[in-house]
Amino acid sequence: MLSAFEGAEAVVHAWCVLPNHYHVLSTTLDLPKLIAQLGKLHGSTSFTWNGEDGARGRQCWHRATDRAMRSQEHFWATLNYLHHNPVRHGYVSKWQEWPWSSARDYLTNQGADEAARIWKAFPVLDYGTGWDDARL
């Protein structure tokens, strides 16, 4: 998955893979190229999985979203939301317990105190509320 982002010269800020979906927070100067790279990834993985399950034509990847960050607040809340996803879905009780995520590296690089400050400053409780307002 990360190679698709590298192939589009995207910078990956955070990522998390769960059993039925994934999240990536990245920046790119070439969104069409990134979307094409992800299309290739999704096409090849769905072809393989559908073949294994004998379910050719089944849609594996759907509701994919590319969303421009509206502000620094949006960026940091998104990063928190993404790393908190395994906890939210009940897989683990702490971010760093989920091995398929950038959370451990993030916590190591930021430090516990700074990560806690960012978590408190950019909560995920109302994640997304108001971001599509015209004023932003």
Image (tube, helix red, strand yellow):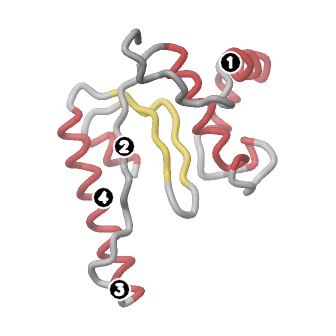
* Residue 41: mark in rendering: 4
User: Considering only vertical position in the picture, is 134 above or below 77?
Assistant: above
Q: How far apart are labels 1 and 2 at the CA level?
A: 24 Å
Q: How far apart are labels 3 and 4 at the CA level?
A: 18 Å
Residue 125 image position (x, y, % from top left): 68, 31
Q: Amino acid at mark 1?
A: Ile
Q: How far apart are labels 1 and 3 at the CA level?
A: 44 Å
Residue 55 image position (x, y, % from top left): 35, 86
Q: Amino acid at mark 4?
A: Leu
Camera-nearest label, 1 or 3:
3
Q: Earlier in the sequence, mark 1 or mark 3?
A: 3
Camera-nearest label, 1 or 2:
2
Callout 3 crowding tier (Cα within 10 Å): few <14, some 14–19, many ≥20? few
Q: Where does label 1 land, which residue?
A: 118
- Quadrant assignment, res 96: top right
Camera-nearest label, 3 or 4:
3
Tell which of 42 and 130 is nearer to you. Answer: 130
Q: Earlier in the sequence, mark 4 or mark 1?
A: 4
Indicate the secondary structure of the residue bearing disc 4: helix
Callout 2 crowding tier (Cα within 10 Å): few <14, some 14–19, many ≥20? few
Camera-nearest label, 2 or 4:
2
Q: Amino acid at mark 2?
A: Thr
Q: Earlier in the sequence, mark 1 or mark 2?
A: 2
Please identify the quadrant where the C terminus is shown: top left
Q: Where does label 3 land, which residue?
A: 55
- Please tell me which residue is depicted at 35% across the width and 80% down the height of the picture: 50
Q: How many marks?
A: 4
Tell which of 92 and 57 is nearer to you. Answer: 57
